[in-house]
Amino acid sequence: MRVIADLHIHSKYSRATSRSMDIENITRFAQIKGLNLVGTGDFTHPAWFKELRKNLTEEPGTGLYRPAEKPDSRVRYMITGEVSTIFNHESSVKKIHHLILTPSLETANQISDRLAEYGDLTIDGRPTLNMTAPQLVEEVMEVSSDNVVIPAHAWTPWFSLFGAFSGFDRIEDCYQDMTKCIPAIETGLSSDPPMNWRLSTLDRFTLVSNSDSHSCWPWRIGREANVFDLKELTYWSVVDAIRAKDPSRFRYTIETDPAYGKYHWTGHRACGISLPPREAIKLGNTCPVCHKRLTKGVEQRVEELADRPVGYRPENVPGYIHLLPLSEIISTVIGASSPNQRRVWNLYDALISRFGNEYKVLIDAQFDELAEVAGVNIAEAIIRVRNGQVKVIPGYDGVYGRIVIFEEPHRELGAPKFKAKKPKQRTLADFV
């Protein structure tokens, strides 16, 4: 059976998260998206944990849960959470985020009891803990060997394993002797498998992708996900497929184009400056407008650590596909200022009604079928995204990238011609 899983989201108890992130809304939009396995997020927060106990029903023998109020829903839940560890290492402060997977609310409660010794779990759904990364792994794995710890959004400049501002150059430096318990790393929105494949030191780790969503809207939840082919859906079948890095079971990850991520290129948001690695290095990573330090992007950070050329691919690893959220595609094509506008929703709802969920629209639907529902502009845009024939102006310093689908005059089949505005990007050439 095909399982599409987004294992890293947040609840309404996390900072900067929508108040609608509850089980009812997560279930509703996960099903619309096409997810059939979702992480709960935030199990360490006492109030959210109480809601999970009330609103989820355990599926015996699976290590997973279903929504109590929607017993017929195809969506299943895995108990997950993200925590932040802050610690000193070789005279510098390290701030690392970690994703935790666990097979039951009981083991989750035991983990929380241990982690409460290192920080206040009531302040935030993603708590800050005064402990080292190896300590965290040791505490989690002592509860149960079934638990999993994964470095979260491993390349984000802040709060990540390889982060430019508080990270490490090697995974072993971060997790030390507990590295043996780390089966995977999370790529994050600003990197994808080809970028990670450039580091030979990561060959033994599986690459997973999740949305880290703070909202249940379909342009957030499931924007990145993992696709499995499993005989049965259980916690252990998913975890074993990840640990084994078996492409016959862990088929591929769904990735946004990494340029779409908020930290792909080096830049400075306040001055509107975004630069590829070579140009940023020429400027000494200094903003050419205000002369402050630039926020180093993921592409530049990968370039610093890579020991392989662009395009290298290891053998026998899970694959990947690049997609963009359907709402973003529609809003780009029709020139809407937001994916939440009613005219975007009207087209989105029509496509979902016809094909069942968003992933079927993005991955499976044929051009003629799409055009019949939403018109040839949107149909062609979806096909172009699917085939990797779109351009994304890279994101930087907290600013999402921008989609460019049609740069050329667009040939229509009986409809008015469409030409998207080409965004202007400031580069080193603007300042020399």
Image (spheres, helix red, strand yellow):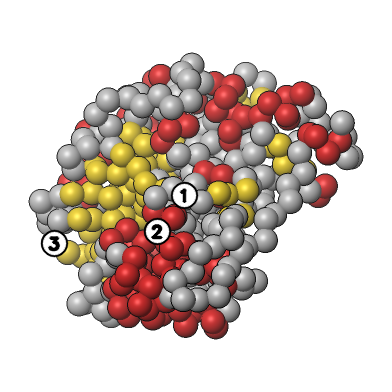
Q: Which residue is mark 2?
A: 383
The residue under the point 44% across, 71% down is 413
Q: Against 1, is 33 above or below?
A: below
Q: Earlier in the sequence, mark 3 or mark 1?
A: 3
Q: Earlier in the sequence, mark 1 or mark 2?
A: 2
Give the residue drawn at x 87%, y 31%.
Answer: 432
Q: In terms of secondary structure, where does tag 1 sit? A: loop
Kindly check if marks 1 and 2 are in contact, taking CB atoms under 8 A apart as contact: yes
Q: Residues within 10 Å of mark 3 (few under 14, many from 20)?
A: few
Tell me the SS state at disc 2.
helix
For the residue pair 301 and 327, the one nearer the viewer reads as 327
The residue lying furthest to the right in this view is: 290
Q: Position of residue 202 (x, y in %)?
A: 40, 25
Q: Which label sits in the foreground, 3 or 2?
A: 2
Q: Which residue is mark 1?
A: 389
Q: Earlier in the sequence, mark 3 or mark 2?
A: 3
Residue type at mark 3 is Pro
> At numbered mark 3, what does the secondary structure look like: helix, strand or loop?
loop
Which residue carries the number 3 mark? Answer: 60
What residue type is disc 2 on? Ile
- Image quadrant where residue 343 sits: bottom right
Using a 10 Å C-alpha cutoff, classify the residue at mark 1 as few (fewer than 14 neighbours), some (14 to 19) or many (20 or more).
few
